[in-house]
């Protein structure tokens, strides 16, 4: 099972649950869906939301979906499917529903395994409610992760603060709190592996939270493999496949491996939407201005924020362009817009030729039916039949136009192209020329104080060492620019005793991407994106620190950064650290960052995998997807 099929596997599990565990080919499965009600808690809702639309749920027979803790009326003749975590509060509410006879039957799907004590509480409660016969199924689903892309997942969205970098590194965090965080992350990673049905080789650095998670995960998988009754990896026995080199590699890293990337201003579409527009669970809200909406100037409703779902499964433009540099996206939108206008013009010309300029679609259809033999009419019939697809394309174009316009406004107002270009040079150890970081910080126009802080922190981490006098000049300039330096105090402390010397590596010229050519084409066209004032950028693709580590581990290279990495193989009868290393390259890897990650790191790994001569699959996960702003807030608390 390829690691980049995680989303598909999770959707299959949820659909099986929605069909009340009747497989398509089973004798009891009906052609028509059985109508049912879906009950979920916050965690269940977050899991389903990026995967299935309301229309998808309706196709699966879900007529109503309601939060578990809401006030719900009885619907006695309908079965109910529950997707919830097995918390004591949720168990109590399920028992209350049974007591109140809200539904005909109950299919209980727990996101993570229910403990024996709570299962006994559930059994006792349903006995007392005289509703044992109504409990049709009780399942441990192992769905305790949110799949945002085919190759991207996070453990949770609600209560994510308890998994944050701040929670892991705060002096106020108790050992028991750390153990809770560890157990949540291990449970989520175990769910990912159980869904994929694979047992990986685990690698991690020593002496940080990543090692703690890796040890506990190795133990959990090992215990599951030893129990033939409950083993979730049916194709994997303890001995069979023990030395199968095609098993995936699970690389667990700590956020402290690389601070610069999480602070970096980005230039790719998906990462920009996340950083500038705060995309959450593949959903973004845009405050649309009236000027962006044709024919709606003066309409008060035009100021209402619009919510857009960005789904790679249903939106081909997003699927193709999400990892592209922003100028390429702007050009691609213009191409799509031109194609739409040409199709629209073709229909208008056909209508004019047939004398139907002012007729409604119903009249056009009637005319088409009466004269199908006519060549023009046949063409118009074809055009009319393509109208629904054309309208969907128009909807997609409008959405991406509005999103790109909002991004462009941020880029131009804050001069983010300049910051991105400068940070790229600093992180790849290239010369920044005559540019003065001090002058940029002191410039009162454009960028926000946070932008200036992000630039300086990257310069401090990745640039040349500073004397105390130089550091004082920079910090004074930052204070004069209105920057709160509390978060920098934490970075300074970390650099004084931690190894923060891991630098990005510049890739070969084959990865070069010239944005100058793209911009010149956009400027010459009749694009609705006014790109004046945005810099023409040309730079080399580079591997970020995490990608460099992943490359070394997958290719069994020897570099300083991974010399002391631990090695776990849960299939070995006895736990050993390094005794059975293989030099055979790995084709698949799951990379998980404890302490948070972002879309820049994710995209860099995906681009790396695509560049390889031998096809590789990499899936990226992190304890939370952070914007730079959110990370700085956490550092402020730690500073």
Image: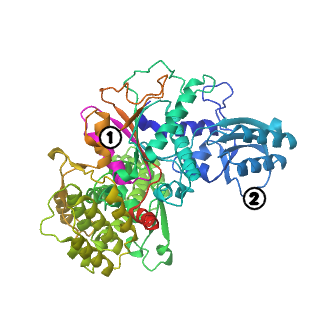
Quadrant of the snapshot with the C terminus? bottom left
Q: Position of residue 125 (x, y in %)?
A: 82, 43
Q: Is residue 353 visible?
A: no
Q: Which residue is mark 2?
A: 71
Q: Position of residue 73 (x, y in %)?
A: 78, 55
Callout 2 touching callout 1 (CB < 8 Å): no
- Along the line of sight, the residue nearer the viewer: 338 or 372: 338
- Along the line of sight, the residue nearer the viewer: 335 or 523: 523
SS for dot 1: helix
Which quadrant of the view contains residue 437? bottom left
Q: Is residue 312 visible?
A: yes
Over which residues does the magenta segment extend?
594-620
Q: Residues within 10 Å of mark 2 (few under 14, many from 20)?
A: few
Quadrant of the snapshot with the N terminus? top left
Magenta region includes residue 262:
no
Looking at the picture, does residue 97 appear above or below residue 142? below
Q: Residue at 64% across / 32% down in the picture?
A: 31
- Along the line of sight, the residue nearer the viewer: 411 or 529: 411
Q: Residue at 43% across / 68% down in the picture?
A: 636
Q: Residue at 26% across / 70% down in the picture?
A: 530
- Along the line of sight, the residue nearer the viewer: 549 or 18: 549
């Amino acid at each position: 099972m390829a690691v980049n099929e995680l989303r598909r596997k999770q959707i299959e599990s949820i659909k099986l649950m929605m069909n009340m565990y009747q497989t398509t080919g089973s004798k009891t499965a009906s052609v028509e869906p059985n109508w049912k009600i879906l009950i979920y808690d916050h965690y269940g809702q977050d899991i389903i939301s990026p995967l299935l639309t309301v229309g998808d749920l309706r196709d699966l027979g879900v007529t109503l979906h309601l939060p578990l803790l809401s006030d719900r009326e009885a619907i006695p003749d309908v079965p109910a499917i529950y997707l919830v975590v097995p918390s004591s509060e949720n168990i109590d509410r399920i028992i209350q529903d049974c007591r109140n006879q809200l539904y005909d039957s109950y299919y209980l799907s727990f996101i993570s395994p229910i403990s024996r004590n709570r299962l006994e509480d559930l059994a006792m409660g349903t006995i007392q409610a005289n509703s044992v016969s109504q409990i049709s199924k009780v399942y441990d689903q192992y769905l305790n992760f949110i799949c945002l892309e085919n190759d991207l997942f996070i453990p949770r969205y609600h209560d994510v603060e308890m998994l944050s970098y701040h929670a892991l590194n705060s002096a106020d965090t108790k050992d028991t709190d750390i153990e809770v965080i560890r157990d949540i992350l291990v449970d989520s990673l175990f769910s990912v592996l159980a869904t994929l049905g694979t047992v990986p080789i685990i690698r991690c650095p020593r002496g940080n939270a990543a090692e703690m998670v890796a040890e506990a995960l190795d133990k959990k998988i090992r215990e599951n493999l030893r129990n033939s009754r409950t083993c979730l990896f049916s194709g994997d026995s303890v001995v069979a496949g023990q030395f199968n080199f095609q098993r995936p590699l699970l690389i667990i890293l700590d956020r402290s491996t690389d601070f610069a990337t999480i602070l970096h201003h980005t230039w790719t579409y998906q990462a920009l939407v996340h950083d500038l527009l705060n995309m959450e669970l593949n959903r973004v809200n845009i405050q649309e201005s009236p000027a962006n909406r044709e024919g709606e100037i003066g309409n008060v409703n035009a100021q209402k924020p619009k919510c857009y779902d960005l789904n790679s499964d249903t939106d081909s433009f997003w699927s193709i362009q999400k990892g592209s540099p922003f100028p390429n996206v702007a050009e691609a939108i213009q191409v799509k817009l031109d194609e739409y206008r040409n199709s629209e013009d073709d229909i208008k010309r056909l209508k004019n030729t047939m004398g139907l300029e002012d007729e409604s679609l119903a009249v056009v259809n009637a005319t088409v039916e009466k004269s199908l033999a006519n060549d023009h009419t046949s063409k118009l019939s074809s055009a009319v039949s393509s109208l629904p697809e054309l309208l969907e394309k128009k909807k997609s174009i409008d959405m991406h136009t509005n999103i790109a316009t909002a991004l462009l406004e941020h880029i131009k107002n804050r001069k983010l192209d300049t910051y991105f270009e400068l940070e790229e040079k600093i992180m790849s150890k290239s010369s920044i020329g005559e540019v003065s970081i001090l002058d940029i910080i002191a410039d009162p126009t454009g960028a926000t104080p946070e932008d200036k802080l992000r630039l300086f922190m990257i310069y401090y981490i990745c640039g040349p060492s500073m004397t105390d006098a130089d550091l004082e000049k920079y910090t004074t300039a930052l204070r004069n620019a209105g920057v709160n330096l509390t978060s920098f105090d934490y970075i300074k402390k970390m650099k004084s005793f931690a190894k923060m010397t891991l630098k990005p590596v510049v890739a070969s010229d084959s990865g070069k991407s010239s944005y100058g050519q793209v911009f010149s084409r956009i400027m010459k066209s009749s694009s609705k994106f006014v790109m004046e004032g945005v810099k023409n950028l040309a730079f080399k693709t580079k591997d970020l620190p995490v990608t460099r580590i992943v490359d070394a581990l997958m290719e069994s290279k020897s570099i300083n950064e991974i010399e002391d990495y631990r090695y776990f193989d849960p299939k070995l009868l006895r736990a050993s650290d390094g005794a059975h290393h293989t030099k055979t390259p790995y084709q698949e890897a799951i990379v998980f960052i404890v302490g948070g990650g972002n879309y820049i790191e994710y995209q860099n790994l995906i681009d790396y995998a695509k560049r390889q001569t031998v096809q590789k699959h990499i899936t990226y996960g992190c304890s939370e997807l952070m914007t730079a702003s959110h990370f700085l807030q956490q550092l402020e608390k730690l500073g």
